[in-house]
């Protein structure tokens, strides 16, 4: 009878956990839709300017494999990057601040708001089930991780924290910064959590460090790194068994001195030269491509298509509100939860106006954060 009761309690506990996990994206998206408004959907100025000849555009798509990417991905990739930004802003916060004071709940809410905005922004495109499934999963994981860390840091973590940072605190802050930089180009599940756990336990306390704080940090974050490494290994095994590798390259059709401009860029190859109609080159996606774009613009390059598309999402950081330059329109704007003096603005930009929009934003004091390359 005792064994039966224990099994029944275990079953009920599992059911409750599963129910809570299922409800997280439901409640999260409900919150996101209720606290955000529908975006502006007026035609984007300049989106059709300088369109390539239809016959040549068809030839480019026929000759270059994987040239065209789904345009809705420029929106649906943003919530993934929102998690990267949360990690980046956490790293900046704990460099000098306390983990207990980080606004965990604000970043949970922010993810679901961002996701809701992107669902609205991509509503005119075909529904991409795989993308939405992935976003629901990573959003749920992001929520669980932040809520658990909030609960821990505001109980045990708050009880052990000291006026100054211990060597263990400094090590963890360094790992947080390293992790945030890692995510700019590599998926989270490739991160060497086990290696960082070993480094944490190898930390030598400085004179005057609290032994309680050091031990608590080592065991708490050591356990977290163990769980994350196991989860990462599971994800990697699952992806290896069921998925094709992610396409890490992006094809870009541009005009101007393209060949000369891309020659010094690493991992970049000129694919086709169409004379007066421009040239197509292939390069690496993600932050590498974002960082390259201003350099190409400075060399006189303008863009025809990126990933076969004529509009793209861009985010910038600034010290105050940003006005959308001609050739773009606002999609969202908010102050960073961990740094309210900094604003993030999302703009939908006509690809063929990138060469004028980005310099105009820079001249207004905005800092380019990312170009969401599908």
Image: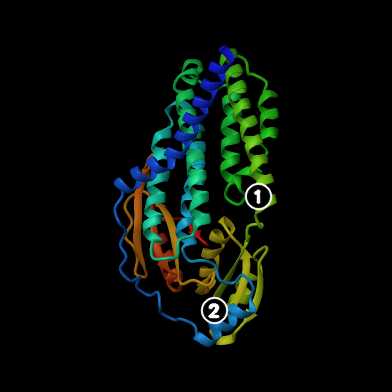
Front-most of residues 119 and 223: 119
Task: Report how far apart the C-alphas of labels 2 and 1 lie in the structure.
Answer: 40 Å
Could you say whether the residue bearing mark 2 is in a helix, strand or loop? loop
Image coordinates for residue 168, horizontal then vertical, percent? 60, 24
For marks 2 and 1, give the one nearer the viewer.
1
Q: In the image, what residue occupies the spot 52% across and 37% down?
A: 91
Front-most of residues 350 and 127: 127
Pick out the residue farthest to the front: 1
Q: Which mark is residue 123?
A: none
- 63 relative to 365 in the view: left or right: right
Image coordinates for residue 92, horizontal then vertical, percent? 49, 38
Q: Measured along the vertical axis of the image, is residue 322 above or below residue 165?
A: below
- 270 relative to 276 in the view: left or right: right
Q: In the image, what residue occupies the spot 53% across and 78% down?
A: 255
The quadrant of the rendering that contains the N terminus is top right
Q: Measured along the vertical axis of the image, is residue 4 above or below residue 137?
A: above
Q: Residues within 10 Å of mark 1 (few under 14, many from 20)?
A: few
Mark found first going from the N terminus, 2 or 1:
1
The residue labelled by disc 2 is 256
The residue labelled by disc 1 is 239
The answer to whether residue 343 is visible is no
Could you say whether the residue bearing mark 1 is in a helix, strand or loop? helix
Q: In the image, what residue occupies the spot 49% across and 30% down?
A: 15
Image coordinates for residue 362, horizontal then vertical, percent? 42, 60
Image coordinates for residue 46, horizontal then vertical, percent? 38, 75
């Amino acid at each position: 009878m005792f064994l039966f009761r224990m099994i029944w309690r275990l079953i009920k506990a599992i059911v409750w956990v599963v129910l809570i996990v299922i409800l997280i994206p439901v409640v999260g998206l409900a919150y996101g839709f209720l606290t955000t408004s529908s975006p502006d959907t007026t035609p984007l100025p300049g989106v059709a300017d300088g369109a390539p000849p239809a016959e040549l555009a068809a030839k480019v798509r026929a000759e270059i494999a994987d040239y065209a990417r789904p345009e809705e991905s420029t929106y649906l990739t943003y919530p993934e990057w929102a998690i990267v930004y949360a990690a980046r802003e956490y790293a900046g916060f704990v460099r000098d601040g306390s983990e207990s004071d980080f606004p965990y709940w604000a970043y949970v809410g922010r993810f679901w708001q961002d996701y809701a905005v992107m669902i609205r922004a991509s509503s005119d495109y075909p529904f991409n089930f795989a993308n939405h499934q992935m976003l629901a999963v990573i959003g749920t994981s992001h929520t669980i991780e932040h809520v658990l860390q909030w609960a821990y840091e505001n109980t045990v973590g708050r009880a052990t924290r000291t006026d100054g940072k211990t060597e263990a605190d400094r090590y963890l802050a360094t790992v947080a910064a390293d992790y945030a930089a890692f995510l700019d180009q590599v998926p989270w599940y490739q991160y060497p959590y086990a290696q960082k756990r070993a480094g944490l336990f190898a930390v030598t306390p400085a004179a005057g460090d609290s032994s309680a704080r050091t031990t608590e940090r080592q065991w708490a974050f050591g356990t977290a790194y163990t769980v994350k490494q196991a989860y990462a290994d599971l994800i990697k095994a699952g992806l290896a068994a069921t998925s094709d590798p992610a396409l890490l390259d992006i094809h870009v059709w541009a005009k101007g001195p393209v060949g000369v401009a891309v020659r010094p860029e690493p991992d970049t190859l000129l694919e086709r030269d169409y004379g007066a109609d421009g040239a197509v080159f292939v390069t690496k996606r993600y932050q590498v491509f974002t960082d390259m774009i201003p350099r190409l613009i400075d060399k006189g390059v303008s863009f025809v298509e990126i990933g076969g598309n004529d509009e793209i999402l861009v985010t910038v950081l600034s010290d105050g509100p940003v006005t959308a330059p001609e050739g773009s329109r606002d999609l969202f704007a908010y102050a960073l939860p961990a740094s309210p003096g900094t604003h993030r603005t999302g703009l939908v930009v006509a690809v063929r106006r990138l060469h004028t929009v980005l310099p105009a934003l820079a001249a207004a004091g905005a800092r380019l954060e990312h170009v969401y390359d599908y």
